[in-house]
Image (spheres, rainbow, N blue to C red):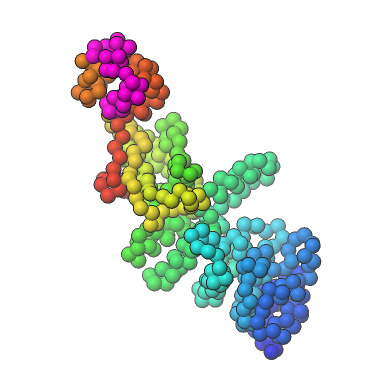
């Protein structure tokens, strides 16, 4: 069957004449109703042994491509033959946006659904190819700093690994697809918002759906946060409003009486959430029941995970309470009697008993003696923290 002028125009517009023999491609398409994988090697001018691009997407192989009818193939030529320009951004392309769902087996139907999504975005929503390929990468990957060009390989690799610990464009593609559908339902036209993860949550709430809660990066079951002087620092992808202020109600962090809160990253990129502490600051982290067998999902946002509790990780000095129960437990762990501890630190048994019962608290001098004798290295171990079941917490939800 002879191709139409419009179909030949698609080939001319979206294939590279230096790498693709367009005449051979047209001949193949006219001879075959069903287009198989061999079409790519047949029309490529570049040897498989050669380095560099062969004129079609590196995403294409026997796993990711299934035979399709002629018309479908021609509609998908903009995707199949997309090439990153020489010297262009290597973060882009099909392989960078293809969503990998670790909970599902990747089948031919899964790949087919991906191509159908691309067709819908390109032909129905009229999103440019550059937008489809580059928007999410631009949202989640921080461009290399000009000074990084002269940095050593180790510094560049370290920076790349740090970026990859957060959300990636592949993680976000299903979210973007859903967001676009919600836009159509809501009558919204901003398909590429400045801060995608924030806009997506606004769309979810406007549609009566649960927003996504974004949590700090994790390694196995340990939440990454650190204290630097008077500031607690969390790293991750966190939603912000138009002014760049973090929207904490869409995170697994709750804060009371902070001095300041700021986030270091633009768009939807991974960055540092900094909470400047005050005398009455309290910080809680939301914990979840999790499947410990799934290691690759630790840094993804929470949607349907079952909440465990809000765990307090910081209490400002004016909110601190002495943990008499922890004192008692430390003594028991060391197999000591109350009289043993009282004698060791030079106080009366009755005074010590009041500390353990919570009637009174030790002064600073006696506290140091207790920590010394009971081998308590961190004063945080003797502070009472208030943990709450998920539904019982009543903190500021900004």
Residue 52 vertical placement versus 36 (above, below)? above
Span highlighted in magenta in the image: 323-349
The secondary structure that dominates the magenta segment is helix
Residue 345 vertical placement versus 177 (above, below)? above
Q: Quadrant of the N terminus?
A: bottom right
Residue 22 picture location, percent across and down: 75, 77
Residue, x 79% and y 62% (percent of image)? 49
Residue, x 38% and y 62% (percent of image)? 204
Residue, x 51% and y 51% (percent of image)? 296
Residue 369 picture location, percent across and down: 34, 15
Asked where in the image residue 111 lies, by quadrant, the reply is bottom right
Residue 45 picture location, percent across and down: 79, 70
Asked where in the image residue 383 lies, by quadrant, the reply is top left
Depth check: 44 or 294 in front? Answer: 294
Does the segment drawn in magenta span residue 343? Answer: yes
Residue, x 66% and y 79% (percent of image)? 35
Q: Is residue 159 left or right of residue 312?
A: right
Does the segment drawn in magenta span residue 130? Answer: no
Residue 255 picture location, percent across and down: 34, 42
Asked where in the image residue 231 lies, by quadrant, the reply is top left
């Amino acid at each position: 069957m002879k191709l139409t002028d419009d179909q030949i125009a698609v080939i001319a517009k979206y294939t590279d004449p230096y790498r693709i023999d367009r005449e051979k491609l047209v001949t193949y398409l006219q001879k075959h109703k069903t287009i198989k994988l061999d079409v790519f090697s047949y029309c490529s001018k570049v040897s498989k042994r050669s380095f560099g691009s062969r004129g079609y997407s590196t995403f294409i192989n026997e796993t990711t491509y299934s035979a399709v009818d002629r018309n479908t193939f021609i509609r998908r030529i903009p995707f199949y033959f997309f090439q990153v320009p020489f010297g262009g951004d290597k973060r882009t392309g099909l392989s960078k946006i293809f969503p990998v769902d670790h909970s599902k087996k990747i089948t031919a139907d899964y790949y087919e659904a991906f191509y159908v999504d691309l067709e819908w975005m390109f032909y129905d929503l009229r999103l440019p190819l550059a937008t489809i390929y580059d928007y999410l990468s631009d949202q989640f990957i921080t461009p290399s700093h000009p000074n990084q060009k002269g940095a050593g390989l180790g510094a560049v690799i370290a920076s790349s690994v740090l970026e990859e610990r957060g959300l990636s464009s592949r993680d976000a593609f299903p979210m973007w697809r859903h967001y676009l559908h919600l836009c159509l339902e809501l009558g919204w036209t901003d398909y590429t918002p400045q801060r995608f993860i924030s806009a997506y949550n606004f769309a979810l709430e406007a549609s009566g759906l649960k927003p996504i809660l974004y949590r700090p990066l994790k390694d196995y079951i340990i939440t990454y946060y650190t204290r630097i002087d008077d500031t607690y620092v969390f790293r991750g992808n966190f939603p912000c409003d138009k002014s760049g202020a973090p929207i904490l109600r869409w995170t697994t962090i709750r804060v009371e009486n902070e001095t300041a809160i700021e986030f270091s990253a633009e768009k939807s990129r991974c960055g540092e959430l900094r909470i400047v502490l005050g005398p009455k600051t309290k910080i809680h982290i939301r914990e979840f029941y999790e499947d410990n067998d799934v290691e690759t999902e630790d840094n993804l946002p929470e949607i349907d995970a079952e909440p465990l509790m809000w765990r307090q990780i910081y209490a400002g000095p004016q909110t601190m309470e002495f943990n008499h129960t922890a004192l008692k437990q430390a003594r028991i762990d060391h197999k000591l009697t109350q009289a043993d501890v009282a004698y060791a630190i030079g106080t009366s048994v009755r005074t010590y008993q009041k500390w353990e019962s919570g009637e009174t608290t030790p002064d600073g001098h006696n506290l140091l003696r207790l920590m010394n004798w009971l081998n308590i290295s961190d004063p945080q171990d003797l502070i009472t923290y208030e943990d709450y079941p998920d539904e019982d917490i009543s903190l500021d939800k900004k």
